[in-house]
Image (spheres, rainbow, N blue to C red):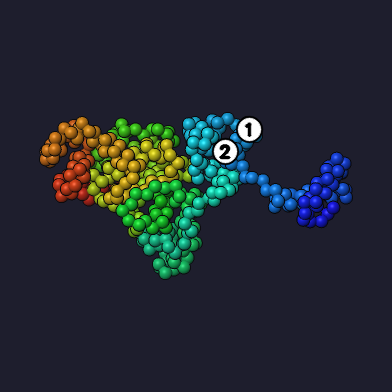
Amino acid sequence: MNKIIKTEQDYESALQEAKRLVAIDPDPGTEEADKLELLVHLIEAYEKIHYPMPMPDPISAIEFRMDQQGLKQKDLIPYIGSKSKVSEVLSGKQPLTLRMIRNLHSGLGIPLEILVGKDEPAPSAPELEWKKFPLKEMLDRGWLGDFKGTLAEAKIQAEELLKNYFKGLDLQLLQEAYLRQSVRSSGQIDPHALMAWKAQALKQAGAQTDVAPYPKSRITRAFITDVARLSYFDQGPGLVEEYLAKSGIHFVIVPHLSKTHLDGAVMRDAQGAPVIALTLRHDRLDNFWFTLAHELAHLALHMDKEEIDCIIDDLDAEGDAREQAADTLAREALLPARAWASLQGQFNKAQIQDLAAKLRIHPAIIAGRVRYESKNYSLLSDLIGSRQVNRIFDKQ
């Protein structure tokens, strides 16, 4: 039989003939061997249509690969995360995230369609439209390399220029990160502008060479308090990069782009190392230290424990439970409740300066808290360090 299988009777006949040929075990290259190979293809084609195999569920596929390669749960930590997270995934308590799916596919060779699930098509990031990137701002900032043409010429060459801009970064991962980011914003964010800004932050972080390996769970409230004590020094903001680098954290300054509404963000680079980027959108010491503490709080509470690749913050906006938790930790680390209570509602300049000296922090941190709690942003304007941050970084 060497014709297309159309009926169940044809199928049964083909099976019987294939069994007969298998029993003969014909030598390769013989007529019988060629006939057996053709029958196998015909049978597979018929079964694919009439007897489709159900797609294995992701957990079964992972367990099969573990059994196949002799892997234990601890061997999945590089692909999934902590030991407890591996246990939660295999027990069905924790769904696979996009980062896990990507790692398991590239590391263990499990097909994406199985990991995603047949009824759950993989979500996709917004289609890139090269001309929608903020080319003028990128051109003005020198982000487009050696290009010296006009804006009109840049628009014509947008795809080439931007592919060169993203060169060295995992563009697919950068696009996918759009789906694994948490955004706190008071306005509509342009995804193309945000992607360009994040890429610049990662490029600047990638240029830093003296950054130690990052140990998870390194960030505690005490650590954030120690970082805040750098504010006691005149050039405090300028000391942050080196201090954080010793703990495995990249720190960069990237001014925000139009339609991004950013104060700061914490993200991961391709190797999983944390990157904190601030925009200095509000050039004040109180905003600098609170935003930095807030991003460190996210790293401690969320980035180290959840599969999130990027948290974007506009601190002028209302936040969800995750943002409120980061706000609370940042406030407590900067100004402990007992110290705050010691002011007894007396927010005069001398008292604030005295408390700041005792805590070894800049008075701007306390003044900023007073203004926030009272919702009176005309108070203590001479203590918040207006226009004192950018000038520090301009000198570096």
Position of residue 55 relative to residue 146, above or below, is above
Instruction: Return the residue nearer the eye: 384 or 109.
Output: 109
> Which of marks 1 and 2 precedes in the sequence?
2
Q: Find disc 1 in the rendering and name its residue.
A: 67
Residue 379 in the image, given as x and y percentages of width and height: 15, 47
Q: Amino acid at mark 1?
A: Asp
Q: Amino acid at mark 2?
A: Ile
Q: Residue at left 56%, top 46%?
A: 117
Question: Which of the numbered marks, if any, corresponds to residue 59?
Answer: 2
Residue 303 as seen in the image, left or right of residue 100: left
Q: Secondary structure at mark 1?
A: helix
Residue 242 in the image, given as x and y percentages of width and height: 35, 39
Position of residue 210 relative to residue 73, above or below, is below
Residue 150 in the image, given as x and y percentages of width and height: 40, 68
> Which of the two marks, 2 or 1, is nearer to us in this view?
2
* Disc 2 from disc 1: Cα separation: 12 Å
